[in-house]
Image (cartoon, rainbow, N blue to C red):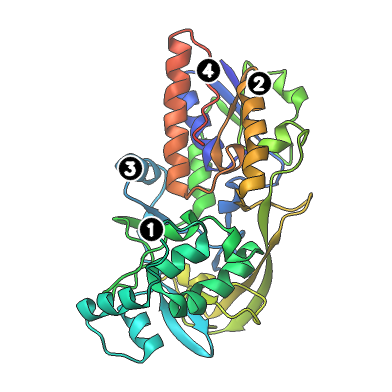
Amino acid sequence: MKFGIAGAGFSGAVLARELAEAGHSAVVYDSRDHIAGNCHTERDPDTGIMIHRYGPHIFHTGNERVWDYVNGFGTMQPYNHRVRSTVGGRVYLLPVNLLTINQLFGTTLNPAEAKEFIAEQADDSIDEPRNFEEQALKMMGRRLYEAFFEGYTRKQWGLPPTQIPASVLKRLPLRFNYDDSYFNHPYQAIPRDGYTAIVANILDHPAIEVRLSTPYTPAEHDDYDHSIWTGPLDAWFDYRHGRLGYRTLDFEEIRAEGDFQGCSVMNYGDLDVPFTRISEHKHFAPWEEHEGTVAFREFSRLAEEDDIPYYPIRLADDRTLLDQYLQAAAEEPRVTFAGRLGTYRYMDMDVTIAEALSAADQIKSAIAGGEKIPALFNN
């Protein structure tokens, strides 16, 4: 079969490669002039620093298949991500751990004492948290919540935390030891040569053609046996029901000599600071040495029509609209929707790759069995 694939990020690339190795052919389109989507990396011409062009991407996973897969296409350098937060004129460690607690409250608690102390701070009147704020108050109490989450969350999502699902906070750990590693996964790394090199290697197959600066349209769809769409779900349908909500990011570049902030990511939790964080990209490759430095302030806002979508909002109104698009997609002939945009879900890179591998397995199985290729939703 001949597949037309919209999007040259991880989802589109992995699906193209898996199908090509199964004897099919694929033409991969991307409206941008580069591959790798929002994971795109490139060397800064002045400093030689590997820049994560659309913001920091840290690869972390506990999935053995995914870990083996990415290592088959490039060298993954071990990298332990650590984040700091500036709040009220002081710097703290994140995620919230024993040092963060002792710093904020001016205490010297041990793990058992800290657990008891935070339990006393927590709001035990909240039985089942209905939103982000209630989840935080039940989990850690008001002071930790207001210091590290309330202001940052309002800036990141442009909404009061009472309008954000509780599930957003459940992803973040609360630790009662001095572990300041941001992620808990056994495999944590960044590609030595950048993510774009990994994606380029995945796409390097004689049965795969890549067409950049070329949007995938219904006209292209007619040229293929089957389409795989990893762009925004609502865009495939020309926004017939309305636009799904996304947050996007604006970046303000900082250039300096030496070391600008001493860490890869510094969050800013105070509401009167307009940006959410500063990322300094030389620290994402500690195995390299650079005299100069490049950092970026990040500003989050609601995505408009011509903006690059980053994060699906998925509030109640979006869920209603999403259901309309999911129903339409299920009825769309010869199309599979994949990836974070194609399924309107926030997914880390490892989940994106895992789902692309699973989708490829299902497509190959359907073809072999003479069955209809599924739409492959997991919402």
Please tell me which residue lies in front, 186 or 256.
Answer: 186
Q: Amino acid at mark 4?
A: Ile
The answer to which image quadrant residue 123 occupies is bottom left
Q: Real-space Cα distance between discs 2 and 1?
A: 38 Å
Look at mark 3 in the image and give the residue it sits on: 68
81 horizontally vs 163: left or right: left
- Work out whether mark 2 precedes mark 1 in sequence or the reverse, and give the earlier one: 1
From mark 4 to mark 3, how far is it between C-alphas?
27 Å
Q: Nearer the viewer, mark 2 or mark 4?
A: 2
Please provide percent x and percent y for residue 334: 62, 18
Could you tell which of marks 2 and 3 lies nearer the N-terminus?
Answer: 3
Mark 2 or mark 3: which is in front? 2
Q: Earlier in the sequence, mark 4 or mark 3?
A: 3
Q: Secondary structure at mark 3?
A: helix
* Kind of element beneath mark 2: loop
Disc 4 is placed on an element classified as: loop
Q: Could you tell me the amino acid type at mark 1? A: Ala
Identify the residue position indicated by label 2 in the image.
Answer: 332
> Does residue 4 appear anywhere in the picture?
no
Disc ID at residue 333:
none
Task: Find residue 278 and report its image quarter.
Answer: bottom right
C-alpha gap between disc 2 and disc 3 = 34 Å
From the viewer's perspective, tell me whether residue 195 is left or right of residue 174.
Answer: right
Other-residue count near label 3 (Cα within 10 Å), few / some / many at <14 / 14–19 / ≥20: few
Label 2 or label 4, whichever comes before in sequence order: 2
Residue found 42% across the figure and 25% down from its top:
361
- Between label 4 and label 3, give the one nearer the viewer: 4
Give x and y (percent) for residue 186: 28, 55
- Asked if labels 4 and 2 touch by Cβ distance under 8 angstroms, the answer is no
Using the image, tell me which numbered label, if any, was put on residue 373: 4
**Where is mark 1, residue-wise?**
189
**Residue 183 visible in rendering:** yes
